Image (cartoon, rainbow, N blue to C red):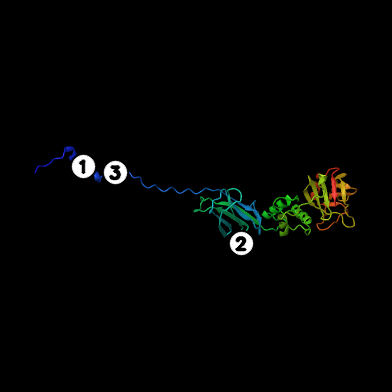
Amino acid sequence: MTQHRLPARRSALVAVLPALLLVPTAAHAQAPAAPAPAPAPAPVATKLTLVTEKARTGEALKGDRWRALVVADQYVAGTKVKLSFKASKRTVSRTLTLKQQKKGEKGYVRFTVPKRLERSSRVVVRASVPSGQPTAATAAKTRIVRQASPNVSPGEKGLAVRMLQRMLADKAYVIGTKGVYDARTQRAVLAFRKVVRMSATSEADSAVFRALRAGKGTFKVRFPSHGRHIEGDIGRRVIALIDKGKAVRIYHTSPGKASTPTIRGSFKVYRKDPGTNALGMFRSVYFIRGYAVHGYPSVPAGYSASHGCFRVPMADATTIYNFSSLGMPVDTY
């Protein structure tokens, strides 16, 4: 039988065809890999601010209900803040979820000092965002609140005295050496107690502290239109130096007793005596006839004892004398 031969070129194609069928196409060989997952977003960085409401200066009275307020510069839902209150060996911790402020983009949490720590002398407050929150963890913010007993005794020194003096001075009562419950500060307490109609003593007890904290004790000026002047309140037995419609100094005084009462009305300073006269009147400021404001060795706390003048302690007389001037109004009532 005669054999038919394929042309050489066709024979070569037939030879390589099986091999080509075994090689994947270029498109299949270079198929793209599955895309890598997108990286998780980084936690939002926040900044915390910690303040102690009602104890912003870091000072409070034992029994006060002050609060820790933590503010985050931006609110992220679900973020928790850890608050801890530590006093001596006691620690109270709370984990609170941020609330959103009504206005703005900030978040906050607020918590009142635990009752079991109200009587501690020193409370350390710490606030932080722990790990695992929608926002990044933060370093702890710290505030220290020192708490004083609302009661001081003559000669006592310390935090309670400083707090007492600051509150008295804010109301224009004249205090003595800072941080010491000295004679002048005791007279300031006496004057305060008279203004708020408490018993006329210099006892700085919890009632005095609470009344001051409540804003009581403001001297109500009767004659603000009289400019720089002196007002003597006969009924409450206090005297006040007035400037620009406000009391700038308030003093304990003893006006005239029932048999020799202090004259009431509006007068003017007509004479000033710098020394001590034969009657023991020191640095006298006369406002009508023989009636004057003057220093005297005896100024009873709880009753009126003078012959019609306003007696003030010797240590206070110089300031009153220097404040007054000829023609200055003096109002007594």
Q: Position of residue 182 (x, y in %)?
A: 73, 53
Residue 225, image quadrant? top right
Callout 1: helix, strand or loop? helix
Label whose residue precedes the other's in the sequence (1 or 3): 1
**In the rendered image, which residue does mark 2 sit on?**
116
Q: Determine the CA span between mark 1 and mark 3.
A: 16 Å
Outermost residue toward the bottom in this view:
116
- Say whether residue 54 is left or right of residue 131: right
Where disc 2 sits, the SS reads: helix
| Residue 49, image x, y percentages | 58, 49
Instruction: Tell me if 38 is positioned left or right of 58 in this view.
Output: left
**Left or right position of 168 against 33:** right
Q: Rate crowding at label 2 as few (under 14), some (14 to 19) or many (20 or more) other CA atoms within 10 Å.
A: few
The location of residue 95, given as percent across then percent down, is 55, 57
Residue drawn at point x = 67 percent, y = 54 percent: 159
What element does badge 3 sit on? loop
Mark 3 vs mark 2, foreground winner is: 3
Amino acid bearing label 3: Thr
Q: Nearer the viewer, residue 91 or 255?
A: 91
Tell me, yes or no, if residue 176 can be seen here.
Answer: no
Q: Which residue is mark 3?
A: 25
Q: Which mark is residue 160?
A: none
Mark in the foreground, 1 or 2:
1
**Do we see residue 51 in this rendering?**
yes
Q: Residues within 10 Å of mark 3 (few under 14, many from 20)?
A: few
Which numbered circle lies on residue 16?
1
